Amino acid sequence: MATVEECRAALRKLAEQFDEVDEETKAKHVVERSVSCHVPDLDTTFYGRIHHGGLESLDGDGGEPGRQADIRLTISSDDLVSLVDGELDMARALLGGRVKVEASIGDLFRLRRLL
């Protein structure tokens, strides 16, 4: 099991990877949304925002109890680290039930273009 700090580091790395997406792609597919990433084996939820300028604040945990984000991910700590490191394929993780995404259909299509 990965630690909270390893998950924070993975989410920071994900934000850096998002920054590498070209501006034209971001302009077409990014809409400002709140994002949460729940890591059940650590009983921790990270909150942040995705917008044209990047992915921000996913390195914090906690937040308001019961807070609902527009895009909600649920993933184990080890799978989060593996996914960000490129060792776990997102499509296989989704199909295998290792990652759960709750979002509107429009948000799902936009995310698919960015991942």
Image (tube, rainbow, N blue to C red):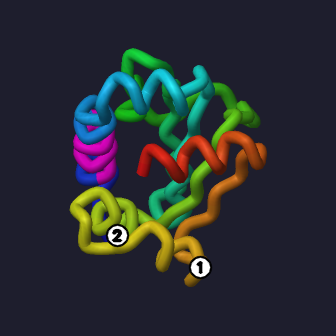
- Residue 112 vs residue 57: left or right? right
Identify the residue shown where x is 34% and y is 73%.
Answer: 88
Is label 1 in a helix, a strand or a loop? helix
List x then y, in percent, for residue 58: 41, 33
For the stretch drawn in magenta, the main secondary structure is helix
Identify the residue shown where x is 27% and y is 30%.
Answer: 19
Classify 26 as above or below 73.
above
Residue that mark 2 sits on: 78
Residue that mark 1 sits on: 95
**Label 1: how many Cα within 10 Å (few below 14, some 14–19, many 20+):** few
Identify the residue shown where x is 49% and y is 71%.
Answer: 91
- Residue 28 vs residue 107: left or right? left
Task: Please state the total of marks drawn on the protein image.
Answer: 2
Magenta span includes 24: no
Residue 16 found in image quarter: top left
Residue segment shown in magenta: 7-15
Classify 67 as above or below 27.
below
Residue 9 found in image quarter: top left
Q: Amino acid at mark 2?
A: Asp
Q: Amino acid at mark 1?
A: Leu
Q: Say which label, 1 or 2, has the lower sequence index.
A: 2
Q: Residue furthest top?
A: 53
Foreground pick, 26 / 41: 26
List x then y, in percent, for residue 26: 43, 27
**Label 2: how many Cα within 10 Å (few below 14, some 14–19, many 20+):** some
Is label 2 in a helix, a strand or a loop? helix
Residue 40 numbered mark, or none: none
Of labels 1 and 2, the one closer to you = 1
Identify the residue shown where x is 70% and y is 34%.
Answer: 70
Classify 17 as above or below 84.
above
